[in-house]
Image: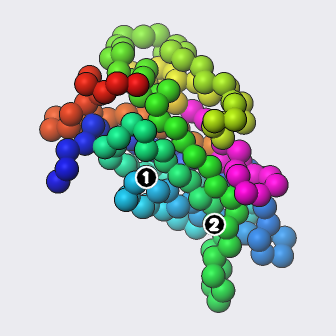
Amino acid sequence: MESFLGLIKLRIKKGSNLKARDTRTSDPYVSVTMGEQQLRTSVVRGTLNPEWNEELTLYVKDVNTPILLTVTDKDTFTPDDNMGDAEINLKPYLECVKMELSDLEEGHIVKQIQPDETNCLTEDSNCIWKNNKLIQEMTLRLRNVNHGEITVEIGWLTLPDSKGLSQVEF
């Protein structure tokens, strides 16, 4: 297998104010794509505010490859309907991971990322020290629809046989 830098633990927490694709509701799930990797959550039936709370693991080969999240309405007899998508840029978070911090106070904010035209953030997103590791919590505005958000969290895992981030230039 081609060498990789480490793993991203992606927790898909919830969706809110999603667009109805069935009469007044939807059966949403999230597809996650990063490079050639494709994963998905389970379907939550009959809601526009689903709670997934599912953790998916992706391997990172290139810090420039974003994670694409696509929210879709599961249909039985017709093709599934797109409910919007969002992208996660890993670079701000991985720059913090590369600092190899340790022993910070619980809840310490290492970096704050502001929403702008280059990301899908709805509000400031924090790289925060939680349970002895660095995570980034974020709420993303879905694109290609007029409303809907998805809340996720990312964490980093360096494996013994992975390259790590020490040689990566940001």
In this rendering, is residue 113 above or below 49? above
Q: Please give the residue where the numbered disc 1 appears in the rendered image.
A: 34
Q: Quadrant of residue 145?
A: bottom right
Residue 53 is situated, as x and y percent measured from the top left of the image, at: 54, 49
Tag 2: Cα neighbours inside 10 Å, few (<14), some, or many (≥20)? many
Q: Position of residue 97 (x, y in %)?
A: 38, 23
Magenta stretch bounds: 137-150
Expressed as whole percent of the image width and height from the top left, the position of residue 63 reads: 39, 36
Q: Secondary structure at mark 1?
A: strand
- On the image, which quarter does residue 65 sit in? top left
Which residue type carries mark 2? Answer: Thr
Identify the residue at image location x=16%, y=35%.
Answer: 160
Q: Which mark is residue 161?
A: none
Seen at 49% across and 52% down, the residue is: 54
Q: Height in image: 26 above or below 69? A: below
How many neighbours does mark 1 have within 10 angstroms: few (below 14), some (14-19), or many (20 or more)?
some
Residue 85 seen in the current view:
yes
Q: Amino acid at mark 1?
A: Met
Given the current orientation, which residue lies at the most extreme right position? 24
